[in-house]
Image (cartoon, helix red, strand yellow):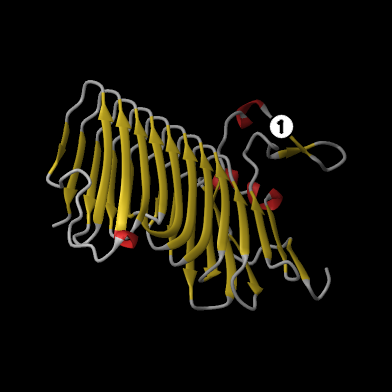
C-alpha cells in the first residue's frame, strides 16, 4: 500500500457488515460489480468515500472476506467487486483454503452501499440486483439482466441496459440511452439526445428542453408530455395501436426560434402512442 493507493482488506464494521472509508479530493470514478446483491449509491457534498457491504443472510458472512474493495487515489478510481456464494464454501481444506460444499449452489451475494462526492461517475454491472442511485452524478452506465434500475436525481449522461428490469430516471442533461426487453421505462426529464427501446415494456417521458427523442417499442404503450413553449416535430408510427396528440404535427407552439424545437420520433407495433402538452 502506497500513499496514493488504498486497498481494503480488514473489517471495520460490525459482525455482519464491512465498511471501508477513503479520503478523496473530489469526484471519482466508481466501478461496481455484483451478481444478485442490491446496489445503492448516494452522491453528496462530502469528499469522503465510503463503501459498506452487508450479506443477505448471516450464513453468508464469509463473503465479506473475499469481496474486492480498492481505491486508487492517483487515478481517482474506486473498484468494488463482490463474489457470489458459489465462489467458496464455509469449510476449509488441509491447506487452509475454503472448499465448496453442495449447499453453496446459487448466487447469494452482498448488498453494496456507496457514498461518493457529488459529480462522480459510475459504471455498474449486476445480474439480478436492484440498483438505486441518488444525488447528482456525471456519467452513469448500468448493465443488468433482471434487476430494476432507479436513478432518482440528475446526471449528465445515462446509459442503461437491462433484460427484464424496469428503468426510472430523474432529469438527464446531455445523453440518455435506455434499452430493456420487457421492463418499463419512465424518464422525468429527457436529455438533449434521448434514445429508448423496449420490446414489451411501456415508456413514459417528460420533455422540457430542445433536442431529439427517439423511442422504439414493439408491444408497449408510449406516453410523452411536452413542456409548453417548445416547437414540436412529431413522427409517430404504429401498426395496430392508436396515435393521439393534442399537439399539431410540426406545431410551432410558442417557441421563439428553431433552436427551441424538440424532434420526437416514436415507432411501435401494437402499442398506443400519446404525445400531449404537459399540464
Q: Residue 160: horizontal and vertical position, in percent?
A: 48, 45
So how many labels did they put on this image? 1
Quarter of the picture holding the N terminus: bottom right
Q: Residue at x 69, y 37 (%)?
A: 87
Quarter of the picture holding the C terminus: bottom left
232 vs 92, left or right, is left
The residue wearing badge 1 is 100
The answer to whether 270 is drawn above or below residue 140 in the figure is above
Q: Is residue 112 visible?
A: no
Q: Residue 232: horizontal and vertical position, in percent?
A: 25, 51
The secondary structure type at the circle numbered 1 is loop
**264 or 148, which is in the foreground?**
264
Q: Residue 183: horizontal and vertical position, in percent?
A: 37, 35
**228 or 133, which is in the foreground?**
228
The answer to whether 67 is drawn above or below residue 228 in the figure is above
99 vs 113, left or right, is right
**22 or 57, which is in the foreground?**
22
Q: Residue at x 27, y 53 (%)?
A: 206
Report the residue that reaches farthest toward the front: 257
Q: Residue 228: horizontal and vertical position, in percent?
A: 18, 60
Q: Quadrant of residue 109?
A: top right
Q: Residue at x 38, y 62 (%)?
A: 153
Q: Residue at x 49, y 64 (%)?
A: 137
Amino acid at each position: 500500500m502506497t500513499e496514493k493507493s488504498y486497498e481494503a482488506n480488514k473489517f471495520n464494521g460490525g459482525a455482519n457488515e464491512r465498511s471501508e472509508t477513503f479520503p478523496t479530493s473530489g469526484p471519482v470514478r466508481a466501478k461496481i460489480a455484483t451478481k444478485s446483491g442490491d446496489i445503492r449509491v448516494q452522491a453528496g457534498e462530502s469528499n469522503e468515500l465510503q463503501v459498506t457491504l452487508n450479506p443477505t443472510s448471516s450464513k453468508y458472512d464469509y463473503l465479506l472476506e473475499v469481496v474486492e474493495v480498492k481505491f486508487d487515489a492517483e487515478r481517482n478510481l474506486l473498484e468494488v467487486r463482490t463474489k457470489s456464494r458459489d465462489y467458496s464454501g464455509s469449510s476449509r481444506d488441509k491447506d487452509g483454503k475454503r472448499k465448496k460444499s453442495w449447499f453453496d449452489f446459487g448466487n447469494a451475494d452482498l448488498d453494496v452501499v456507496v457514498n461518493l462526492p457529488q459529480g462522480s461517475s459510475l459504471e455498474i454491472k449486476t445480474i439480478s440486483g436492484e440498483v438505486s442511485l441518488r444525488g447528482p452524478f456525471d456519467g452513469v452506465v448500468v448493465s443488468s439482466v433482471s434487476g430494476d434500475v432507479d436513478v432518482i436525481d440528475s446526471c449528465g449522461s445515462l446509459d442503461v441496459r437491462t433484460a427484464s428490469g424496469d428503468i426510472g430516471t430523474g432529469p438527464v442533461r446531455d445523453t440518455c440511452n435506455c434499452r430493456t426487453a420487457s421492463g418499463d421505462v419512465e424518464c422525468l426529464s429527457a436529455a438533449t439526445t434521448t434514445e429508448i427501446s423496449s420490446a414489451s415494456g411501456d415508456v413514459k417521458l417528460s420533455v422540457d428542453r430542445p433536442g431529439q427523442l427517439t423511442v422504439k417499442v414493439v408491444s408497449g404503450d408510449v406516453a410523452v408530455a411536452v413542456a409548453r413553449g417548445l416547437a414540436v416535430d412529431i413522427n409517430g408510427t404504429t401498426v395496430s395501436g392508436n396515435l393521439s396528440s393534442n399537439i399539431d404535427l410540426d406545431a410551432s407552439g410558442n417557441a421563439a426560434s428553431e433552436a427551441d424545437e424538440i424532434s420526437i420520433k416514436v415507432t411501435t407495433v401494437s402499442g398506443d402512442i400519446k404525445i400531449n402538452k404537459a399540464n
